[in-house]
Amino acid sequence: MNALYDTIGKGYAEYRRPDPRIAAAIEAALGDARTVINIGGGAGSYESRRRDVTAIEPSATMIAQRPPGAAKAIRGTAEALPFPDKSFDAATAFLTTHHWSDLGKGLREMKRVTRGPCVFFDHQMSDLKFWMITDYFPETGQQFGPLLPLEAARAVFGAVRVVPVPVPHDCTDGFFCAYWRRPRMYLDPKVRAAISYFAKVRDVEARLERLRRDLDDGTWARKNGHLLDKLEMDYGYRLVIADAGTWE
């Protein structure tokens, strides 16, 4: 993860601004937790300003983009958290678990340093019916697998709650599916540089040149014009919540 985000992470903070609707769902999941460890904290998205947050992040490029007043960030990895047992009231991990080198070990570390709850914001990729995949990158649904760490989380924490997080049409957090109603945004290389998906797939320029042609000649609108009336869509983003009562 460190090398990837040292390469693609420049300008990340400009395009990955927390969406307030998603932030509200995360705040609700954290309940009355006062101290929070945010694992894979990146540029600070979704870190609560009303809680005492400590961020762990392996990439110096990402840490350098944290805004003034953001929580302090320590360079480190999910698999080796430098804190004693039960140091925090809660833990968070936002769109990061698929970058961990050892998911199970990272989850066990998360549990170890936390009194609970542990809150993940993650993405279900397999069987995703998103036009970018179905029309332009059809092989990647199988290539990436589920991503959502459900089975691994259940193995570590026991029962977990799963809360759907719809993607608003004007989502301010430019993750992979954020521009489902604004397809021309994907033609901007700066936008793509803030989406790790595009660093991992092949023939990106050729696929997006086809998207450009489809937008210009009306093909995209004929296939996907029904989306233009939608205010939000379910594209597989989920909060996965492990409450302390399920694993104590």
Image (cartoon, helix red, strand yellow):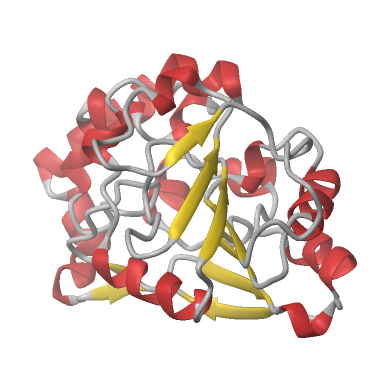
Q: Nearer the viewer, residue 181 or 73?
A: 73
Q: Which of 170 and 59 is in front in this view?
A: 59
Residue 58, x across and y down, in percent: 58, 26
Residue 5, x across and y down, in percent: 49, 23
Residue 140, x across and y down, in percent: 59, 41
Residue 161 image-quadrant placement: bottom right
User: In the rendered image of this protein, does residue 101 appear above or below residue 159?
Assistant: above
Q: Tell me if I can see residue 197 in this picture.
A: no
| Residue at x 21%, y 72% (from the top left corner) | 226
User: In the rendered image of this protein, does residue 101 appear above or below residue 225?
Assistant: above
Q: Tell me if I can see residue 22 in this picture.
A: yes
| Residue at x 34%, y 65% (from the top left corner) | 50
| Residue at x 60%, y 49% (from the top left corner) | 141
Position of residue 236 in the picture relative to residue 126 (left or right): left
Residue 115, x across and y down, in percent: 72, 69
Location of the C terminus (image quadrant): bottom right
Q: Residue furthest bottom?
A: 245
User: In the rendered image of this protein, does residue 177 appear above or below residue 243?
Assistant: above
Q: Which of 143 and 44 is in front in this view?
A: 44
| Residue at x 53%, y 73% (from the top left corner) | 33
Number of labelled discs?
0
Location of the N terminus (image quadrant): top right
User: In the rendered image of this protein, does residue 63 appear above or below residue 113?
Assistant: above
Q: Nearer the viewer, residue 238 or 20?
A: 20
